Image (spheres, helix red, strand yellow):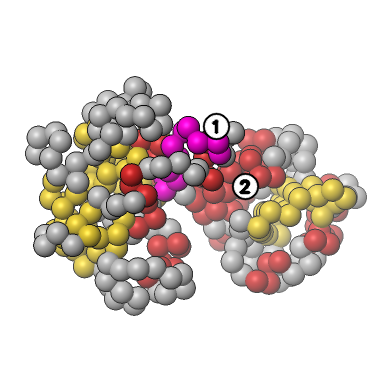
Amino acid sequence: MPAGRGVTIRAAVSHGVGVPPSIEDLQLNAPNPNEVRVEITACAVCHSDLSYLDGTWATDFPLVLGHEATGYVVELGESGNEYGGNGSDLAVGDPVVITLIRSCGICRACRRGHDVACTGEISLNRRSPLADTAGNRIIQGLNVGAFAEQVVVHRSQVVKLPDDVDPVAASLLGCGVLTGYGAVANTAQVAAGDAVVVVGCGGVGSGALQAARIAGADPILAVDPIPEKRVAALGFGATHVVDPARDDIATVITRATGGYLADHLLVTTGAPAALDGAIDLLAPMGNLVIV
């Protein structure tokens, strides 16, 4: 299709709780100013997607889910007054990773570095770029809708990838790794030498472990009841692993640190039991971060 016109794509459309998504033809709008059309290369399945599909989280239907994705730029909208102009560092053909977080770049929150709390006017927040063949609007799930051949997203939602990065692995950067890394680097602000405990070693927890390693934390303890996840945690940066069904967590922490408790405890699982006694595992002035 020529630039500036919408395209027909195929997407997995969800029509209700417990209803399997169906592959359908949809109309995808051309990108407006400060928007980018991306051909999807890979999209991971996040537990958030499943939570909408099984009714754990409320949502309207019909919608296209999928928000951890990579692809390459196929069309750039015109520059505008959102996000300081569009496309200055992007070109058609560039590989990108996509995130669900949109930010205008000019509101007070964005100027203070709090992009996730953006209050600016972004046109995609008011209308979905997706419609069925009859013209009925389809919700762009979690601001991306990447269970599809292509997406249109805001310029702030894409970051150019180096050519040598595996796009399949990089798709996880869009949410899971980003969430775990941000909890360590931005919320907890872990510093070199801090004692860090990560409870739950799924996708988010693995991202937190990597971030703690990058920050120079030591020791880094990973807590998970699943043996395979504990083994994987060692590869992601954990110096010690803990089986909560067998080990006394406080004892393992104090042995690893030489006598004190955790400077930072990050709970990255939704299991309520993970919070039991969490405060008691913290050193004085320690941080508890519930992700």
Specify the label residue 111 is tagged with: 1
Image point (46%, 73%), residue name:
56
Q: Is the magenta stretch mostly helix, strand or loop?
A: loop
Image x and y of residue 230, in percent: 61, 58
Image point (34%, 22%), residue name:
88
Q: What residue type is labelled 1?
A: Arg
Q: Give the range drawn in magenta.
A: 97-109
Q: Which residue in the structure is indicated by mark 2?
A: 183
| Quadrant position of the N terminus in the picture | top left
223 over 84 or under it: above or below = below
Residue furthest to the right in view is 259
Image point (37%, 49%), residue name:
125
| Quadrant position of the C terminus in the picture | bottom right
Q: Image check: 167 left or right of 259? A: left
Between 7 and 94, the one lying in front of the other is 7
> Is residue 272 visible in this depiction of the protein?
yes
104 over 250 or under it: above or below = above
Q: Distance between the residues labelled 2 and 1?
A: 20 Å
